[in-house]
Image (cartoon, rainbow, N blue to C red):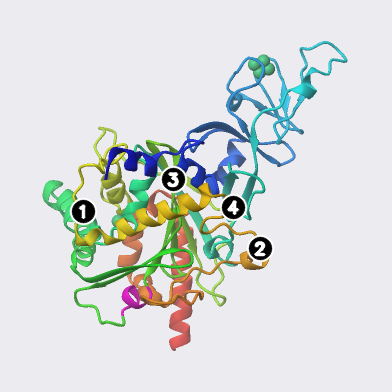
Amino acid sequence: MRAEENALLTQTSAGTPMGELLRRYWWPITGSARLSSEPVLPVRLLSEDLTLFKDKRGRLGLVDRRCAHRRVDLSLGIPTDDGLRCMYHGWLYGADGQCLDQPTEPEGSRFSEKVRLKAYPVQELGGLVFAYLGPDPAPLLPRWDALVWDNAFRHVGAATLNANWLQCMENSVDTAHTEYTHGHFFEYAVMDKGGGTGDEAHDRSVRAMADEFKRPHVKTEWAVTQYGIQKYRLREGEPDDSPDWTIGHPLVFPYFVRLGGRLRSELQIRVPVDDERTLHLDYFAYCPGPDVEVPAQDCAPYFEHPLFDEAGRPIVDYVVAQDMAAWWGQGAVADRENERLGASDRGVILFRKLLTEQMKIAQDGGDPMNVFRDPAENERIDLPVNSGPGPVAPAPSTPEEKGDLTAVEGDDAALRLRRHHVDRYSPALEGVLEVYRRYAEAQRAARA
Ligand code: FES
Ligand SMILES: [Fe+2]
């Protein structure tokens, strides 16, 4: 790849071809839960500095980072009934960016009518706050299945890392990395280099998890579908009708990957902060089906998870942190000029081609993939997680998929969640384990 081609794929600013494609989508910028404790937040999205606020009547606004008066940071501002007041001279802005009051100007002045900040639409769904920075009219906010299922227990992990968003997304079509990143490397880092923990159950679970990941791939395949790229894999020891091969899982264009069945459904969402940083959201919906009630929840908790320990060493004993080490390990923007792609990189090549095609569609004024405008199409978008290579028949997934049942029962599953998944940092971890317990109980009762 030439330097210009790499720049084309990785730039996020307004006016660049990729920046314009990315502006056709609604982006999650934080969790709703975070706004209840911090109603005014600085946001950087697609290389733009903005301020997100919730006014005292609960309405959300996303406006320019700086006040129009003398350019003070509005994320230091004060939420009011009608909007956000700047901390310096108290100018007040509504959610649409209009200046509504200038307390230090003379009585009767109409100056405020002429002042308006840049402002973008914001909406909440499934515990996330979404923003749209693109041209009018804004499309519908897509109602992806896991965001809108009833009776689901949710939580959202977040980490900002020093890497362009495309590195994270390319990982989602880089099927083969699991053998090394989550198998050999995991075992080496924790057991061989780290010397184990001395806790027998812990060390046993590391070895067992690493062994599962180490299994070599026999076959891998990728197919462009209605929603993105469906990925299929068959590992050594698995029968040809293994759901990983016949069902696969989707990269949903352009910015997330959907993993797991309904019981533990994971959306790994990559939000471009700017050209060299990404906000990674791990969105989980635990949905055990109609017969098992999940623990009550006001709002999905939003928690940040660390990538480095106090000494600055990478933490690599949980799965997504291993991926993240590979992403920031490629540098802020991966050197695609000097990479050497092999046969296992066909998925990566396919994704780059799809991005280039969709960039052209946006440039020509069309709607790229996954821009929805028909409400009937958007009631709930069930992702295609139940068909093999070839035509895709969308249908909801079931908890039985992917051996979820075996993952639920036995202490090992709980131990893995407590130790080797990002859930370990969640304030809702016990709620997640309770979903599993209730589900396992219902399964036992059904069998009896
Ligand atoms: S700088 Fe914001 S009110 Fe003066
Ligand atoms: Fe991975």
Q: Nearer the viewer, residue 129 or 418?
A: 129
Q: Which corner quadrant of the figure contains ligand 2? A: bottom left
Disc 3/disc 1 C-alpha distance (Å): 30 Å
* Numbered badge on residue 374: 2
Which residue carries the number 1 mark?
Answer: 341
Q: Nearer the viewer, mark 3 or mark 1?
A: 1
As for residue 246 lying within the magenta part, the answer is yes
Indicate which disc, 3 or 1, sits on the residue closer to the N terminus: 3
The residue located at (57%, 32%) in the rendering is 50
Which residue carries the number 3 mark?
Answer: 158
Q: Report the magenta residues as a range.
A: 242-247
Disc 1/disc 4 C-alpha distance (Å): 43 Å
The residue located at (28%, 58%) in the rendering is 174
Q: Is mark 3 within 8 Å of ligand 2?
A: no
Farthest residue to the front: give it: 364
Which residue carries the number 4 mark?
Answer: 299
As for residue 170 lying within the magenta part, the answer is no
Hey, what amino acid is under mark 4? Cys
Label 2 environment density (alpha carbons within 10 Å; few <14, some 14–19, many ≥20): few
- Tell me the quarter of the picture where residue 433 sits: bottom left
Q: Nearer the viewer, mark 3 or mark 2?
A: 2
Tell me where residue 380 appears, x and y as whole percent.
60, 67
